[in-house]
Image (cartoon, grey):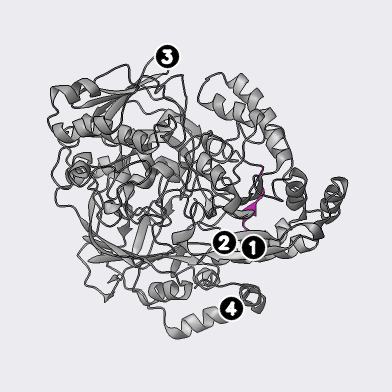
Amino acid sequence: MQFFSSRRYAIGRVVVAAVVIVLIVIAAAAFIYLAGSSTSSSSSGSSTSSSSGAPNTLTIDDVFWPAPADLNQLVAIGEVPYPNWLTYTVYQPLITLNASALYKQGVVQYLPDLASNFTQSADGRTYTFNLRQGVKFSDGNPFNAYQVWAEMYGFYYLSANSSSFLESYNVFNMSQVSFGPSSLALLNQSGLINPSPAALSMMENQNWPIYVTGPDTVVFHLQAPFNYFLGALVVYVGLMFDVQWLLDHGGFGTPAQMNTYFNQNPIPGTGPYVVSGFSEQSYVEFTQSPSYWGASLTPAQIQANPYLDPGHVKNVVVKANFNDVSRYTDLSSGQAQIAGILSQDLPVVQANPNAYGVFQFPSKAAVFVGMAMNTQRYPTNITAVRQAIVHAINYTAISDNVFFGGLNRMVGPEYPIFSQFYDLGNLPPYQYNVTEAQNILKAANIVPSTLPALQFRVVQGCDYCSSAAQIVQFDLSQIGLTVNIIVTPPSSYSLPNIAGTGSYSQALNASQTIAQLSWFGTGTFAPAADTPADNWLLSSNNNTSSNNWAIYSNPVVQACVNAFTSTSNTTLLTELCTKAQAQEYSDAPYIWLGTIKLFFGAGSIVWDKSAVSNFYVDPVYSGQSSTVIFNTVTFVSPAAHPIPLTPSVITSSLSSVTSSWFAMMTRARLP
């Protein structure tokens, strides 16, 4: 994430039949297990607990509201909305990651989800998914292969027929595909429950890369072996929804204007919860689905795949609470059991480890913070200017003063977690050296005072983004560059105002209206797919559907990008990407600040230990949502009763925070 980008994570490999293959060991986010005693309350105050210790209503305070299109799953084509609170709770994928293995052991394994099993052909190009039978969407429509097929080609249509519609992965040969308004008209006439012969003929056409062989089997045929294909199906476009219901309610829309009816009328999914309440920019209420197909799963089956859990509380309210003090107040008073707490109040909860748990990533999780420079707009379209900027920034000051010392420097665009492809040229992270920055400008005959002020666009509500931007503003003034910080509402933080939520071509066309500096992903950024190809295909690709924040492309770099999805020859891939690494390092389109320790970089998910026992976050390291996957939340036993956190305790905790911390934080605050 992003925060509002959704972004990407982890790794993939090959899975044969129903056998789960451990792909690689990675330093993933830590599994959360909490111990504690019990009290429970709803979002509106005290709530009678069930005999299991769960409250009647679980209330979660999140930092953001889903942007840019509320609850519309169609915008997944651009790897938004972010956060997507419906991920796995309402919409489920064909396959998922083994959450227990990922968060307990740091191991990536693929498991069936809505697929009962899946196989890969010997040549590595054909993946066959056999679907669970008897699964229905929450509105009663059956989940079948026709629904999967229609969703995939619907996204292809919304992408303006881009072969990279699947999370920017150019893995399909779409040259024989003719899918458009007439195809959609045929599906409207036929329906997807019992398709007509004409519709079946289209769906069974094996000259197209995605086809069905019956109501319970769907096949994906790749144009070349791609070892990481499964990782592209875990979230975003891989989340399944009821296309029949969509067709009954106006359809997909068009590439120029997708159907906005679904912004506040979410398409039904197969998951354990349904949306039962909604208030714009305020909250979404969820209720357990009475017809959830996984309600009868055994404890052993749920332990094997926690993301299938039916949930442990009837109602869940996820609130978009944009004020950090308010979120902390909700948490400390029992109005919320889980909350996002940023830098303003994080020291308070850290001072009370018996009362609160704080989620942390290990040092090499695939989550980072960084900034982008518009490579198409003057003066950041000058390589020497960008090179000077990356050496003028005091990275240690940003880490210490904004991120609690929690940044681990990195050399992008590869995530450090993928050691096989990380920093292939063994290049050092950009170093803070004002003299070198000044010399770069001088050697290029650039007089900083003659350059226009640089715009640095920051999303409203991201306190630490503003704090870090102010440090950059000061640092660049030391080499004669002026920076104007522009705070932008989340609803406007999209093209043409900023890159990252539209295709590379859209960003290129709008480049002269896009700020010279921006946050990569508007803050913390995480993968959109579990593959080492992820950030290459996003940040440095001229054929991406989103997140090329620098609007950057170079032929040497593009050769590496293309190789990820066109060859299984690791030696060739390494050779091409080593050259690409050196080229991008020299071009300096991005300011890679580093991987992060805390979930939000300068804050994290915090839970009330007296109420919550354990939970999981999404399988792409925060790339899908800025809070927990709430159907995985379990609660402590009601046997013990905690001492409430009284005002005197809060006051004592506040006084323990050093005055220097508050002095630093007065520079910027969440609204």
Q: Which residue is mark 2?
A: 458
Marks 2, 3: nearer the viewer:
2
Marks 4, 3: nearer the viewer:
3
Q: Which residue is mark 4?
A: 656
Q: Which mark is residue 123?
A: 3
The amino acid beneath tag 4 is Ser
Label 2: few (<14), some or many (≥20) within 10 Å? many
Q: Quadrant of residue 118?
A: top left
Specify the segment rendered in magenta. Answer: 404-411
Q: Which residue is mark 1?
A: 469
Label 4 and label 1: CA atoms lie apart by 28 Å
C-beta proximity under 8 Å, tags 4 and 2: no
Percent x, y of residue 625: 41, 53
C-beta proximity under 8 Å, tags 2 and 1: yes
Dot placed on the residue nearer the N-terminal end, 2 or 3: 3
Query: With respect to residue 184, does 219 lie above or below?
Result: above
In this rendered view, identify the residue nearer to me: 508 or 573.
508
Label 1 and label 3: CA atoms lie apart by 49 Å
